[in-house]
Image (spheres, rainbow, N blue to C red):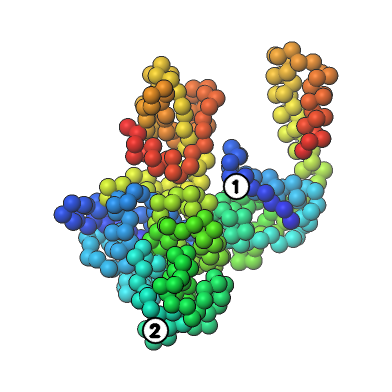
Amino acid sequence: MKKAIEVKNLTKEYKDFKLDNISFTLPVGTIMGFIGENGAGKTTTIKSILDIIKYDGEIKLMDKDNKNEALKDIGVVLDDAFFPEILNAKDINTIMKSTYQNWDSKLYFKYLNDFKIPSKKQIKQLSKGMHKKLEIAVALAHHPKLLILDEPTTGLDPVARSEILEIFQNFMVDPECSIFISSHITSDLEHIADYIVFINEGKILLNEKCHVLLEEYGIVKCKKEELENIAKEDYIRVRKYRYDYELLIKNKKEFKKKYNSEVIDKISLEELMVLMLKGE
Amino acid sequence: MDIIISNNSNVPIYEQIKEQFKSKIIAGELSTGELLPSIRVLAKDLRCSVITTKNAYEELEKEGFVKTIPAKGVYVSKINKEIAKEEQLKKIEKMLEDVVILAKINKINKKELNTILSIIYEER
């Protein structure tokens, strides 16, 4: 299996926060969704991957020993935008052309056209969605094999978000391409992600195929007496409400067989995230 | 070609894709030797993950409906339509059996059951 990203025992310590021994692998040709609360360690992980900060542990990109060599095949969209506001999209082409070896002006203008970004309008006059799309066009214009995206859809309206997801799926038609995308808008990831890594307080809580989470995990609602009859190992979390209990279970089919329960709800990534963090 | 996927269904998405391809192959809408879209293009067009479409094709291959030719693509296999239809009929019989058992438990007679069946059949 070819690996786009391989993170082994990544640790980074700040005064009040620790990224604690994180490991995961993104196989080439797939999309990994990186989810977690604000402050869980998503951006710190991404900055480590990109060598923006120093860290302990091992990170390998595109199976290459030399990270710098791999970095040129990576397109990046970070949470905090970086373009000077008085420039326009055309100016950016001029700058990038002289900075990046692989920069493809023709492809860049094609993306501007596809995304309907006006090339002569000052960046400060662009809407938030346009701005993000411009960043994505820049990230794509040097023929990357791997996209690393930190919250690319946060703060955008549903139409802009769906347009951006479409761009990513078009990118993924090439089997050599991979995407690592962090987000707390989990519904965006639900459909397109192959893997989900869930990080909390600097630790990985869950690393699973997305469809397994959506198809096999479930929510059971029950009364107190019913809860007492359910073995502890058959649920991952339980959350107490005023009138009932909510259980997060790992295998709907087996649970149904064992307890003969009729009501097992499908789970969304959002519900999963909340139950994992709010349940006991 | 129409493929409709429901994200709210309890049927896994890969299975929905698989079943719809199967019925198109059985009905002859997809013919023997026809090249199917790649897992990636299909994932893009159906707005789902690549693993999902890959699973769907793998299941179809296991059941003999398609054949993957490495580096070329996934092709519709030659299937025996009679046998395939027979299989589907068997499935229907089995499901109807459950229906009849449930009806008998609840003392719903044959006539009532037939009425329900025709209404549902017309509505779909």
Crowding near the residue tagged with mark 1, few <14, some 14–19, many ≥20 C-alpha atoms within 10 Å: many
Does residue B111 lie above or below A145 as drawn? above
The chain containing the residue under callout 1 comes to B
Of A256 and A242, which appears nearest the observer? A242
- Alpha-carbon span between mark 2 and mark 1: 45 Å
Q: Residue B14 carries which label?
A: 1
| Residue found at the very far front of the displayed protein | A125
Helix, strand or loop status at disc 1: helix
Does residue A103 lie above or below B116 as drawn? below
Which numbered mark, 2 or 1, is in the foreground of this view? 2
From the top left corner, tell me how far across and down residue A166 is, in percent. Answer: 55, 62
The chain containing the residue under callout 2 comes to A
The answer to whether residue B53 is seen in the rendering is: yes
Q: Residue B82 carries which label?
A: none
Q: Which amino acid does label 1 sit on?
A: Tyr
From the top left corner, tell me how far across and down residue A94 is, in percent. Answer: 42, 86
Q: Which residue is drawn at 38% across and 24% down?
A: A242
From the top left corner, tell me how far across and down residue B37 is, in percent. Answer: 66, 61
Q: Residue at x 52, y 55 (%)?
A: A158
Q: Is residue B91 left or right of residue A75?
A: right
Q: Residue at x 38, y 27 (%)?
A: A241
Q: How many marks?
A: 2
Q: Which amino acid does label 2 sit on?
A: Ile
Q: Which residue is under mark 2?
A: A95
